[in-house]
Image (cartoon, rainbow, N blue to C red):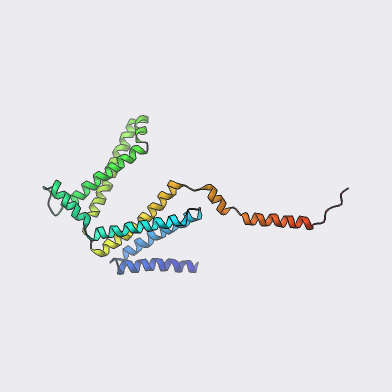
Amino acid sequence: MLLLLVVILVVLGTSMFFGEWLFGSIGWGVLHGSLFFVGLALTAVMVAVAFNPIRLFLWFLLAFVIGILASLIFGFDILNQAYAAIGNALLPGVDAANRPLVTGMLLVGVIALMIGLVLFFRMGGAGTFRESPGKGIVVLLLTVLVSFLYGAVIGASTSITFAWRPAFGLGLSIAYLLWIVFLIGDLFRTGIDDEALKERFYPHRTIDTTKETLEWLQKRMPRENES
């Protein structure tokens, strides 16, 4: 237990130290440490139920490559400049200072809305309309509202201009979140291989040793006289 506490202290302490030193706030360290433990716990469980560790490590690498790219995008204000350019072309009447914010909210909100509608109909939304039109309309309206608001929040968040330290802090957070999402997606997509799990935990060696022991005892135990 003490060694376990030492490991936890080292991980959280290191995360908070780097959060303050590299990213400018100890809050980044708390967030990164928490996400790291969640991802590590999922990885340990999936390895225990016979998932391929190499594939899980590749998910980790992919998430961190995307996180580094996100850090560069935020650090160079690429999204802010893109929103500003689109806003200059489509929303000239909006104040220039607020144009990237408004454009980002509308653009990403509409994209999220389209994704939400596609997911709604792919997950049986048409069947809901057939079974109960009233319920289908309510679910559809909620899907539209939640999707657009979710996209608008992302658009507003990505329209901000970032200094390099918080840009890398946000990129690392995205990497940890994507790592968790990739692991959960792999778990639901692949499922648990019952045969591989049984083979992993089936006590072959113990059973074989027991059989050999029984055979050895049967050969050496005295047999009763036959009548």
Compared across the picture, whether 71 is left or right of 98 comes to: right
Percent position of residue 121, x then y: 34, 37
Q: Is residue 34 above or below residue 152?
A: below
User: Which image quarter: residue 71?
Assistant: bottom left
For image coordinates 30% across by 62% down, the residue present is: 169
Count of numbered labels shown in the rendering: 0
User: Which image quarter: residue 144?
Assistant: top left
Residue furthest left in the image: 93
Percent position of residue 132, x then y: 35, 31
Compared across the picture, whether 148 is left or right of 215 comes to: left
Compared across the picture, whether 219 is left or right of 165 comes to: right
For image coordinates 68% across by 56% down, the residue present is: 210
Percent position of residue 206, x then y: 64, 56
For image coordinates 39% across by 66% down, the residue present is: 12
For image coordinates 41% across by 53% down, the residue present is: 183
Percent position of residue 75, x then y: 24, 61
